[in-house]
């Protein structure tokens, strides 16, 4: 069994900002809100990035809690990010990506708070999406013209 998995998504955009994304057998519609020129048919890429972080943290909390026999009744995660859209529009000197991301983890559990804090510290260090966002992961763009 290999310890390395390759995850892949494919997207298609035929008009406007609406993008159809396929991940395995799952389909996601991505779009921008109307106030940013889209048709609001789905979450935008930044919202999906935040959803990826929030869901990865939720999964990691549950996974590592089960390994440590920590009882969790409920886990909810709220992730928000601040974006200056002028960077996306090409204004020099403005960062096109998120300025910061804030995460609020709410955990209902009978466990002592210290035990939960230790769990969250471990999860923060081992969540693949958080690690990717924190680090400089190379991205190589390749063009294929049809």
Image (cartoon, grey):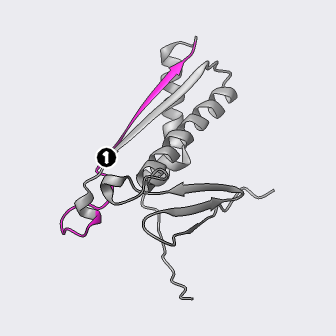
Q: Report if residue 89 lies within the magenta region.
A: yes
From the top left corner, tell me how far across and down residue 95 is, in percent.
26, 60
- The number of numbered discs placed on residues in the rendered structure image is 1
Indicate the quadrant where residue 109 lies: top right
Q: Is residue 27 above or below residue 16?
A: above
- Residue 145 location (% of width, % of height): 53, 88
- Asked which quadrant contains residue 88, the reply is bottom left
Q: Is residue 28 in the magenta section?
A: no
Q: Is residue 134 left or right of residue 109?
A: left
Q: Is residue 88 left or right of residue 71?
A: left
Viewed as shown, does residue 101 lie left or right of 123?
left
**Vertical placement of 118 versus 143: above or below?**
above
Q: Nearer the viewer, residue 138 or 10?
A: 10
Q: Nearer the viewer, residue 24 or 70?
A: 24
Question: As drawn, which residue projects farthest toward the right?
Answer: 1
At horizontal 54% and vertical 56% (from top left) the residue drawn is 29
Closer to us: 30 or 107:
30
Q: Residue furthest bottom?
A: 146
Quadrant for the N terminus, please: bottom right
Q: Secondary structure at mark 1?
A: strand
**Residue at image point 63% right, 63% down:** 8
Range shown magenta: 88-109
Q: Position of residue 27 (x, y in %)?
A: 63, 56
> For mark 1, what is the residue?
100
Q: Which residue appears at 52% of the width and 47% of the height?
A: 52
Residue at x 58% of width, y 61% of height: 21
Q: Quadrant of the C terminus?
A: bottom right
Q: Residues within 10 Å of mark 1 (few under 14, many from 20)?
A: few
**Whole-percent x, y for residue 78 in the image:** 44, 34
Q: Is residue 2 above or below residue 110?
A: below
């Amino acid at each position: 069994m290999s310890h390395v998995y390759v995850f892949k998504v494919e997207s298609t955009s035929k008009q406007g900002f609406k993008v159809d994304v396929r991940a395995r057998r799952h389909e996601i519609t991505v779009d921008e809100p109307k106030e940013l020129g889209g048709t609001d048919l789905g979450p935008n890429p930044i919202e999906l990035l935040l959803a990826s972080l929030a869901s990865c943290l939720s999964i990691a909390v549950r996974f590592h809690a089960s390994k440590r026999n920590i009882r969790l009744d409920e886990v909810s995660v709220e992730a928000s990010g601040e974006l200056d859209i002028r960077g996306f529009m090409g204004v020099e000197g403005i960062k096109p990506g998120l300025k910061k991301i804030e995460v609020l983890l709410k955990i209902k559990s009978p466990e002592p708070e210290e035990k939960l804090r230790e769990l969250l510290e471990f999860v923060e260090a081992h969540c693949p999406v958080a690690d990717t966002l924190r680090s400089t992961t190379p991205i190589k763009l390749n063009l294929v013209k049809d």
